Image (cartoon, rainbow, N blue to C red):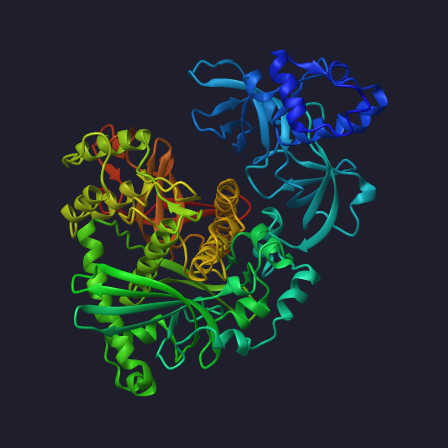
Amino acid sequence: MSQDEHTVVTATDIRRLLEASNKPLTRRQLSASLGMDKESSDQHIRPVLQAMMATGEVVRNRRAAYGLATDMALIRGRISAHSDGFGFVVPDEGGDDLYLSPRQMRQVFNGDKVLAAVTGVDRRGRREGAIVEVVERAHRQVVGRLLLESGVAMVVPDDPRLTQDVLVPMDRVGNASPGQIVVARIDKPPTLERAAVGEITAVLGKADEPGIATDMAIFSHDLPAEFDPAVIDEAKAFGATIDAAIAERRKDLRDLALLTIDGADARDFDDAVYAERTRQGWRVIVAIADVAEYVRPGRPLDDEAYKRGTSVYFPDRVIPMLPESLSNGLCSLVPDQDRLAVVCDMRLDERGKVQGSRFYEAVIRSHARLTYDQAQRIGRGRDPALRERFAGVCDNIDSLFDAFDTLFAHRQRRGALDFDSQEVYFQFDPEGRVDTIRRRSRLDAHRLIEECMIAANVEAARFVGNGELPLLYRVHEPPPAEKLENLEAFLRAQGLKVNWKEAPEPAQYASLQKQVSGRDNEALLNAVLLRSLSLAVYQPENKGHFGLALAHYAHFTSPIRRYPDLLLHRAIKHLCRRQPLDQFPHGEKAMVEFGRHCSWTERRAEDASRDVDERLKCQFMLRHLGEQFDAVVTGVTSFGLFVEIVEFGISGLVHVSAVPGDYYNFDPVSHRLVGKRRGLSYSLADRVRVSVQAVSVEERKVDLGLAGNDREA
C-alpha cells in the first residue's frame, strides 16, 4: 500500500498486521508495512495505537513494540485492594483472581483496570502477577484527612481500600487546614517509584459535621451530583403539564381509581396500581411513569441518565438519575395530576397465575397517594377513619390485598425465596445529627407492591423477548460451586439433608427454609443460605432469576430511578407502536455494554449508601460507649464474632480475645467458636449480650465485648 493511497489507518489495519506477524511490532515496523514515513506515522498510526492501548486491546512492551493483549497471555481485570497493602486482579473473563504483592499495588488504586501477567505461584498455591499496563484509572480524586508532617502535606484517603496517601505540594493546599476532610484531585497517578501527587480542590469540613458523611461518599465514589445546565434546560423545556395532543392519542384511564403506595418520605412516584374482581380471578393494572416519552436516545438527558445509571438514596438526601423537574415533577405520578404512563394490564386466575397481559400507552390520574402504613391500616386493619378519608379508593385497596393474597400464594408454590429482613432508618435532630436509629417493619402493604411489580416485570420481559427486541434481563444465577460446597458442609453439620445432586433449584432452598421455620436455627439457616447466593446483574442473555424462581425477569417498574427500566420502556413503546424492529435504537452489542455499566453503577450506589450508613452508625455509637445491648451473632471467624445489635441494626466485632473464660477453636463447617476446656460454643444466630468498647468512625468499626452472657459461670 503506497503512502498516497493510505489516507486513514484504522484499528482493523493494526489488528490485521499484529495478527499476521505473530509477534509484537514497533511503530517503525508498522509504518514500513503500511508504506508510511515518520511524519505520516505520527499523524495516522500513533493516535490509533493510543486508542487501542486505552481500551487494553494493545500493549506496548519495554522494547517499545506493540502486541495484542490476547496474544501476550495477559489478564485484563479490575484491581481489588486489601487494607493490609496487597491486592488482586479480578479477571474480566472470570476465573481465579491474580495475587499482587504490596510492591505491585504501589502503582494502582482499588478499582483500576489493568493488564497483568502471571509471574509465578506463591507458597499458598495462588497465582502471583505483575502489572503490565494500567488501562483505566478508577479514581480522579480521593477524599480524606489532610495531614502536615515535616513540611510535607498529604491526604490520607478515607476509603480503607485506598492504601496510598496522596502527596500535595504546599502551594496546592489552598485554604485547607490540617485535620480537615478534603477532596484531592489526582494530577499524577502513583507509580512504583513514587506516590500519587494531587491538589486540594474542595474542603468538606470536620469529620463529625452534620451532612459530611454524605458529602464524603459523593466525592469518594465520584458520583455525578450536579446536572449540567443543558440537561436541566432540556428537562424544564417539557413544562409542568403533559402535552394534551399526546394524551389524546392514548388510552384514557383517568377515571380508573389508580393509586400510589410508597414510603412516607418518597418524593418520586414511579408506579400506580389498581385491581378489580373478575369472573376468572382478578384484573391487575400496573401503570408506570412514561419516562421514555421525554428522555430520548442521544440527547443530553439520556447521556446523563446513562452516566448515572441509577438514583442514589442517602439518609439525608437523594441524588436523582433525572433532574427534579422530571423525577419529582412531570414524570412523578402525584395525585390529581394527569400523567403519561406505560401500562401492564394483567389477568390473574384464582390461584394467582397470570393468564394473559397486554401493554399500552395511557394517560392516567392517580386518585390517592398512600403510605405503606396507611394502606396496611385500610386494607388489613379496616381503620374506619382512614377508610372514610380514602373512601374513593377503598374498593381498589381491598381488591389489591385480595389479589396480593393469591399472588403471594403462587410465589410460595413456585418456590421463590423470601428473606424477610428489617431495614433501619435514621432520625435526625434539628442540627442534622443522628438522633436515633429505628427498625422499619415489613408489612403486607410492602409485599403487595412488591408482588405487583414482580408480576409486571415478568410480563414486560416476556413481551419484549417475544417481540424479538434486545433487552437487559435482571439475571440472578444459581449459587456458584465454591459457595455450594461450603453450604452443603454446613447443612450436613446441622443434620439437614442436601436434596439436590449437582445444583439446587429455588424450591429446594425454599424447602429448607420451611423445614426450620419457627425453630431456634431458622435465622442461622437463612443467613447461610443468603450468603451462598450470587449477585444479580443486568445482561442481555437470559439466564433466569434464581431467587424469585422465574425463567424471565427484567426491570420495568422504576424508570425514574433506574436506567435499565428506561431501556425496557423504549422497547415496549417501540412494539406498541408497531415500528420496524431494525429501527430500534439499541442493538445487542450495545446492550452488553449497557448491562455492564448499569450493574457497575448499581454496585457503586450501594457502596456509597452503605458507606454513609456505616459512618452514621459509628457516629451514633460514639455516644453509647460502655453501654450494653442485646445482640445476635451474624458471622463467625477464627478471630472472633460479628454480631448485630438488635435494637439499632448496627454490626460490630467481638474479638476472640474478648470472648472470656476459655481458649477457642474455629469450626468453619458449623460456623462456630468452640471452647477448648469448657466446651462453650458460639454459633451463627446465637443471642448474646454485648458492651460497646471502642468505635472508629474513620475505619467504620465498632468493637464490642461479651457482657453478662448467661453461659458464663
344 left or right, relative to 167: left
Asked whether 349 or 161 is in front, the reply is 349
Residue at 50%, 47% in the rendered image:
598
173 left or right, relative to 233: right
Q: Which part of the image, by quadrant, shows the C terminus?
A: top left
Q: Which part of the image, by quadrant, shows the N terminus?
A: top right
- Residue 494 in which image quadrant: top left
- Residue 324 in which image quadrant: bottom right
Above or below, 137 against 565 in this view is above
279 left or right, relative to 206: left
Does residue 290 appear anywhere in the picture?
Answer: yes
> Given the current orientation, which residue lies at the most extreme right position?
39
Asked whether 514 or 280 is in front, the reply is 280
94 left or right, relative to 677: right
Residue at 67%, 55% in the rendered image:
205
Does residue 647 appear anywhere in the picture?
Answer: no
Q: Position of residue 167 (x, y in %)?
A: 73, 36
Residue at 28%, 36% in the rendered image:
661
- Total marks shown come to 0
